Image (spheres, rainbow, N blue to C red):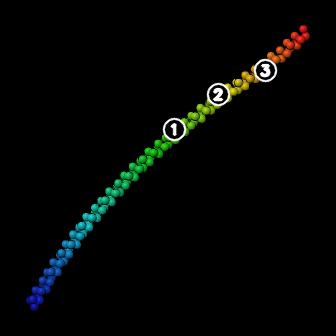
Amino acid sequence: MTERLELQSRDQMGEASNMNKRYEKERELNERLSEELEILKQEKERKVLDLQAKLDKERENFNTRKREVEQRAARAETKQTQLMLGHEAEKATWDTKMTEFKHQIDELKSKNDRLQANLEAKEQQIGRL
């Protein structure tokens, strides 16, 4: 019976030793997995921060380009307005000159008609003499 108890005692000790070894392996595995999980979390957080920074920079670049385009559009619109106003002013000047020339033509035609009538009257007077 003592042998039996001794055998049982050794079996229990061997089993306890095996349990301790399994516990240590499981604990080491758990620690390693926890460390890997922490590393993965840190990498994920870093990637999120990098992507957020990239997004912020792209947003800033987009807004800068948008402002530049809006400024160019405003300058183009201003220039177009200036050109149109200049064109209208020049057109008004030419219209005024054209009107003045037409009046001069009408005056010269009228003067020419009077001179022609006067010439004819003089010719008739000369023809009577």
Please tell me which residue is depicted at 15% across the width and 80% down the height of the picture: 14
Q: Which residue is mark 2?
A: 93
Residue 39 position, x and y percent, is 28, 61
Mark 3: secondary structure: helix
Q: Which residue is mark 3?
A: 110
Q: Residues under labels 1 and 2: Cα distance?
A: 27 Å
Seen in the image, is 49 located left or right of residue 113?
Answer: left
Among the two numbered marks 3 and 1 on one chain, the one whose residue lies closer to the N terminus: 1
In the image, residue 44 sits, relative to residue 58, either above or below, namely below
User: As shown in the figure, which amino acid type bears the numbered disc 1?
Assistant: Arg
Q: Quadrant of residue 12?
A: bottom left
Q: Residues under labels 3 and 2: Cα distance?
A: 25 Å
Please tell me which residue is depicted at 62% across the width and 30% down the height of the picture: 89
- Name, please, the residue furthest toward the bottom: 1
Among the two numbered marks 1 and 2 on one chain, the one whose residue lies closer to the N terminus: 1
Residue 54 position, x and y percent, is 38, 52
User: As shown in the figure, which amino acid type bears the numbered disc 2?
Assistant: Thr
- Name, please, the residue furthest toward the right: 128
Pointer 2 local density, CA inside 10 Å: few below 14, some 14–19, many at least 20: few
- Quadrant where the image shows the N terminus: bottom left
Please tell me which residue is depicted at 28% across the width and 62% down the height of the picture: 38
